């Protein structure tokens, strides 16, 4: 018998919460190990989008697919960071309906541990997308023009943004009445953010005024511009700071809300 | 401390419905309390409140001296919960499910593994340990779920309708494991819709209806209060049914019911000693029987006596609670 059982502590320390989060992340990874086909979307999506966008828009937007590829790939990194969060809410909602979360909530672990664990476990999805995207992009002729450190910083920034946006997906997963609703809602918020940005076009000046304003303020545009600068060179400007500020802002709003919903969910 | 569960005046409403309407409960250490009631009587709400999953609107409850709201973390360290549907990860194997829970309880990796092995063996799941839970039968799932709630060697185990939906064989297996848990010293609160189940497992029974405790006592006390048992007997040879009816009438002092098509003779009995007298009488008359049983009053009969309305009526009225709680 462990001492923890004999003398239960009143509060859960941050270190234990992190360890519990990692245990639950291991759960997600074990699931993928048993059914690797669950990774098929993260594997194929980067390839499909890269090929489609490149050959549909390349000639029209940039005059040549090669020039367009350089600009498109960092944008797709941002897009995949957004798309990778979509499955999270659905998985969470299923956990709640199947009663798995009841089990977690009856254990002496921090309330945030199952949510943190789900997000950390889903990192596999994000990483897979990134690796496939970069590898397939390189095959088609994409090259990084900066040093490895900057490239790494780019991916790290995309990951931080992904973690923040994940909480939106988590929040929806917690409040939605069914997994299907979560999916429907995911499209509603992911699509305008993803496509109303500078992911596909570096020049937003041909957009109507309202859309320009949206694309300019859109955190996905800031992330995309940061990634272009960090991967292709050129001035980074304030885009990295805007991206980080947005990430922090999103977390500050969604994390407490998610914790409240999670506590209320009976 | 002699009481491991103590609840006073628990209240919980969902909209206009009172799921718990002032519930008092008390469970002495090492005993089994059966919470009996129809669907939606408030049994599940009571369990979820005591297991810290939901907060009561009013009233208080303590588990092993810890308040379920204020000291929720300590309470969770003392309890094991098996809900109505198996709360397991379907994609993971039996071993993985139990190891995960051990790790969440801060067991070192090796200890989590050995505890998982030990529980799987005890619940006769060793052969299925490496298979994904989604391939398990209903009874196996229920057993694994029970194992999952015992990883932390809880002092108090909550079982919410542990056998609902199981076939008789799987049900008996779950009963055996519940008895084993009690033998190891845990106290159990179990909810059920079946008087028979409460009778088989519980030391004391409380009956829930409309979020209130409407009766409490031992199974015998409840049955005695709820009306009599029914003697059911059938003659081996159909033409002797009349003779059998006469014997039953004489022994019970009642006019027996006779089903002409099946030859089934039944009569209410006040005293279960009648069974022995009947066997002697049958023997004396050389009258063979194919069926002979003393049937307990059903939950419906207990309910009717206690509340004046049938359990089904109550369940219909309370369905709104379930809907309300999901909204």
Image (cartoon, coloured by chain):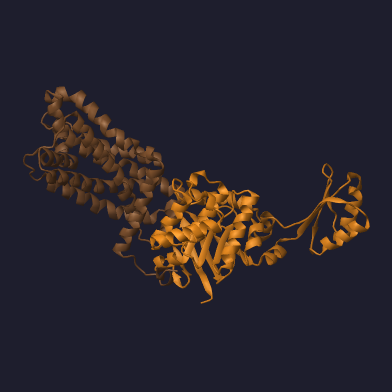
Chain colours: A brown, B orange
Residue B54 in view here: no
Quarter of the view holding residue B202: bottom right
* x, y percent for residue A39: 34, 39
| Residue sitting at x 69%, y 67% | B221
Residue at the bottom extreme, as displayed: B1
Is residue B5 toward the left or the right of residue A144 in the image? right
Q: Is residue B273 above or below residue B292?
A: below
Quadrant where the C terminus of chain A is found in the figure: bottom left
Q: In the rendered image, which quarter contains the N terminus of chain A?
A: bottom left
Q: In this view, which residue lies farthest toward the left?
A: A235
Residue B8 in the image, given as x and y percentages of width and height? 50, 69
User: In this image, A2 relative to B272: left or right?
Assistant: left
| Residue drawn 18% across the image and 46% down it | A157
Between A85 and B169, the one nearer to me in the picture: B169
Q: Please name whichever residue, A12 or B241, is drawn nearer the observer in this view of the structure.
A: A12
Residue A184 picture quarter? top left
Counting from the top left corner in percent of width and height, residue B45 is at 50, 58
Q: Residue at x 51, y 59 (%)?
A: B119
Q: Is residue A157 visible?
A: yes
Residue B220 x, y percent position in the rendering: 70, 66
Q: Nearer the viewer, residue A118 or A98?
A: A118
- In screen coordinates, is A240 left or right of B66? left
């Amino acid at each position: 018998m462990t001492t923890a059982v004999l003398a239960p502590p009143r509060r859960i320390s941050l270190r234990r919460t992190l360890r519990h989060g990692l245990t639950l992340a291991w759960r997600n990874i074990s699931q993928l190990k048993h059914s690797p086909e669950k990774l098929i979307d993260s594997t194929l999506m980067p390839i499909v989008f890269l090929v489609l966008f490149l050959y549909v828009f390349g000639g029209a937007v940039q005059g040549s697919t090669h020039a367009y590829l350089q600009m498109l790939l960092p944008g797709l990194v941002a897009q995949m960071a957004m798309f990778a969060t979509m499955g999270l809410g659905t998985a969470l909602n299923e956990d709640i309906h199947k009663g798995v979360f009841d089990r977690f909530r009856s254990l002496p672990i921090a309330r945030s541990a199952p949510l943190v664990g789900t997000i950390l476990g889903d990192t596999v999805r994000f990483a897979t997308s990134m690796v496939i995207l970069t590898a397939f992009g390189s095959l088609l002729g994409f090259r990084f023009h900066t040093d490895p450190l900057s490239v790494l910083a780019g991916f790290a920034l995309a990951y931080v943004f992904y973690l923040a946006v994940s909480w939106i997906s988590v929040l929806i997963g917690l409040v939605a009445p069914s997994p299907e609703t979560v999916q429907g809602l995911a499209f509603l918020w992911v699509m305008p953010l993803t496509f109303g940005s500078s992911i596909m076009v570096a020049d937003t000046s041909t957009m109507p005024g309202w859309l320009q304003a949206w694309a300019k303020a859109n955190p996905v545009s800031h992330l995309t511009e940061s990634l272009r600068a960090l991967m292709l060179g050129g001035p980074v400007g304030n885009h990295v700071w805007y991206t980080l500020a947005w990430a922090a802002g999103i977390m500050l709003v969604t994390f407490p809300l998610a914790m409240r919903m999670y506590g209320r969910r009976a | 401390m002699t009481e491991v569960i103590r609840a006073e005046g628990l209240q919980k409403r969902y909209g206009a419905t009172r799921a718990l309407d002032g519930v008092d409960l008390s469970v002495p250490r090492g005993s089994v309390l059966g919470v009996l009631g129809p669907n939606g009587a408030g049994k599940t709400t009571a369990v979820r409140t005591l297991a810290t999953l939901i907060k009561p609107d009013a009233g208080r409850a303590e588990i092993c001296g810890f308040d379920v709201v204020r000291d929720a973390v300590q309470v969770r360290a003392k309890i094991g919960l098996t809900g109505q549907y198996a709360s397991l990860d379907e994609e993971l194997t039996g071993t993985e499910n139990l190891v995960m829970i051990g790790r969440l309880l801060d067991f070192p990796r090796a200890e989590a593994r050995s505890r998982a092995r030990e529980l799987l063996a005890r619940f006769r799941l060793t052969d299925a340990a490496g298979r994904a839970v989604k391939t398990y039968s209903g009874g196996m799932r229920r057993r694994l779920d029970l194992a999952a709630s015992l990883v932390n060697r809880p002092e108090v185990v909550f079982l919410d309708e542990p056998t609902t939906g199981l076939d008789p064989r799987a049900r008996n297996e779950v009963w055996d494991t519940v008895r084993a848990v009690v033998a190891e010293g845990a106290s159990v609160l179990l909810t059920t819709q079946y008087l028979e189940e409460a009778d088989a497992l519980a030391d004391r029974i409380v009956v829930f209806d409309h979020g209130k405790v409407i009766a409490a006592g031992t199974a015998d006390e409840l049955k005695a209060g709820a009306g009599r048992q029914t003697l059911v007997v059938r003659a081996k040879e159909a033409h002797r049914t009349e003779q059998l009816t006469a014997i039953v009438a004489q022994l019970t002092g009642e006019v027996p019911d006779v089903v002409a098509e099946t030859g089934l003779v039944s009569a209410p009995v006040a005293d279960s000693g009648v069974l022995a007298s009947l066997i002697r009488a049958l023997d004396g008359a050389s009258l063979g029987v194919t069926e002979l049983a003393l049937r307990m009053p059903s939950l419906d009969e207990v309910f009717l006596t206690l509340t004046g309305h049938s359990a089904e009526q109550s369940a219909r009225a309370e369905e709104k609670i379930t809907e309300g709680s999901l909204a």
